[in-house]
Image (cartoon, rainbow, N blue to C red):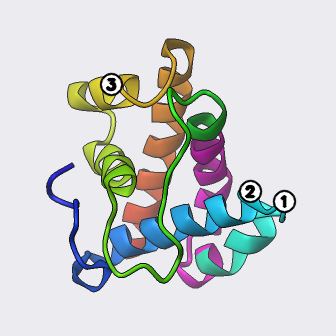
Amino acid sequence: MYLYLDRPVCALAERDAFLLAAMRTWVAAARTGRCVCRALSSGFAARQAPDAMADFITAMAMLDRRGLEPVRVAPIVWPKVTDGEARLLSLFALGSGPHAGRAAAALVHDEAIAPLLGAIDAVRTILEETAA
């Protein structure tokens, strides 16, 4: 988490900056009743990862609906990574290893851990493939 906390968005790796923008976009759309698919589609298409969008939406919905606390992110133009965003970026960075399970357990109810990690792992796999 501390790898990301309070870092300038412009200093993030491209993949992390993309994920952060997608998180902020998802939350903004969901909180205002807009279609999250429509809000995210152009970003995932531009990243050449449209197949990752459904799993990303699943992960964010799990965090939102089965989370231990509300998902908190900054507005899309905020220049630094916030605490909640750092936690989420760390979860995406951890993959499916043992630390990921502990990180997920700090964010969602027990029954949501496996589906959340599965969705995140699918997103990571697709983003790694499209970066190659």
**Element type at marker 2?**
helix
**Label 2 sits on what residue type?**
Ala
Identify the residue position indicated by label 3 in the image: 101
**Label 1 sits on what residue type?**
Gly
Q: Which residues are magenta?
A: 44-61
Residue projecting furthest to the top: 110
Identity of the residue drawn at 58% across and 84% down: 46
On the question of residue 104 being in view, the answer is yes
Residue 24, disc: none
The quarter of the picture where the C terminus appears is bottom left
- Asked if 126 appears above or below 10 in the picture, the reply is above
Give me the C-alpha separation between circle 1 and circle 2: 5 Å
**Label 3 sits on what residue type?**
Gly
Identity of the residue drawn at 77% across and 64% down: 37
Does the magenta segment cover residue 60? yes
Identity of the residue drawn at 26% across and 43% down: 94
Residue 119 image-quadrant placement: top right
Q: Nearer the viewer, residue 111 or 64?
A: 64
Give me the C-alpha separation between circle 3 and circle 2: 26 Å
Identify the residue position indicated by label 1 in the image: 33
Query: Decide: marks 1, 2 in contact (CB < 8 A)?
Result: yes
Residue 30, disc: 2
Q: How many marks?
A: 3
Residue 70 image-quadrant placement: top right
Q: Nearer the viewer, residue 49 or 3?
A: 3
